[in-house]
Amino acid sequence: MASDEVKSDRRYTKEHEWAQAHGGNVRIGITAFAVDQLGDITLVNLDVKAGDELTVGKAFGTIESVKTLSDLFTPVSGKVASVNPAVIDRAELVNDDCYGAAWIIEITPSDANELESLLDHVAYAEFIKTAGH
C-alpha cells in the first residue's frame, strides 16, 4: 500500500475507519485500505440518523461491495451531527474519494480525548503492513 493512502491529518481504527476533527465534530469514513480490500463499493446503509447517540465500537451501518458486506463501527462516542447523503445516494463515491467527499457520518464527540486515543497515521500504516489484512 502506498504511504500516501494513509493521510497524516486524521486518526484510524483497526477496523479501517478514519476519524478527523471537523469543526467541533469528528468526521468518519473508511480508509483506502478498506476500499481496496472490499472492492467496488455498491451500497452504504446507515442504521443511524442525526441526533442518535453512539458509543465506541458499536456498528452504525454497513458497507456493501461486490465481494462482501462489512459493518461500520463508531470510533468515538457522541451524538450523530449529520450523515452524508451523497454516499447514500451514490455509494461508488467511496471508491473515488474515500478521504474526502465520501465521509459517512459526523459525530459531536462526548469526549474530545477519544479521537486522540485512536491510531495515528504512522501506527495505522504499520498495522496494515504487519497485520496482513
Image (spheres, grey):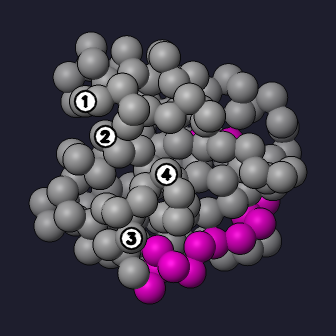
Viewer-nearest residue: 57 or 119: 119
Identify the residue shown where x is 20% and y is 23%. 132
**Would residue 94 be counted in the magenta stretch?**
no
The answer to whether residue 45 is left or right of residue 39 is right
Query: According to the image, label 4 marks what residue?
Result: 99
State whether residue 46 is above or below residue 95: below
Q: Amino acid at mark 3?
A: Leu
Q: Residues within 10 Å of mark 4 (few under 14, many from 20)?
A: many
Q: Residue furthest front?
A: 4
The residue at which mark 2 appears reads as: 33
**Label 2 environment density (alpha carbons within 10 Å; few <14, some 14–19, many ≥20):** some
Q: CA distance from mark 2 to mark 1?
A: 7 Å
Return the residue at label 3. 93
Specify the amino acid type for callout 4. Tyr
The magenta stretch spans residue 77: yes
> Which comes sooner in the sequence, label 3 or label 1?
1
Q: Which residues are magenta?
A: 75-89
Res. 92 image quadrant: bottom left
* Mark 4 → mark 1, Cα distance in angstroms: 15 Å
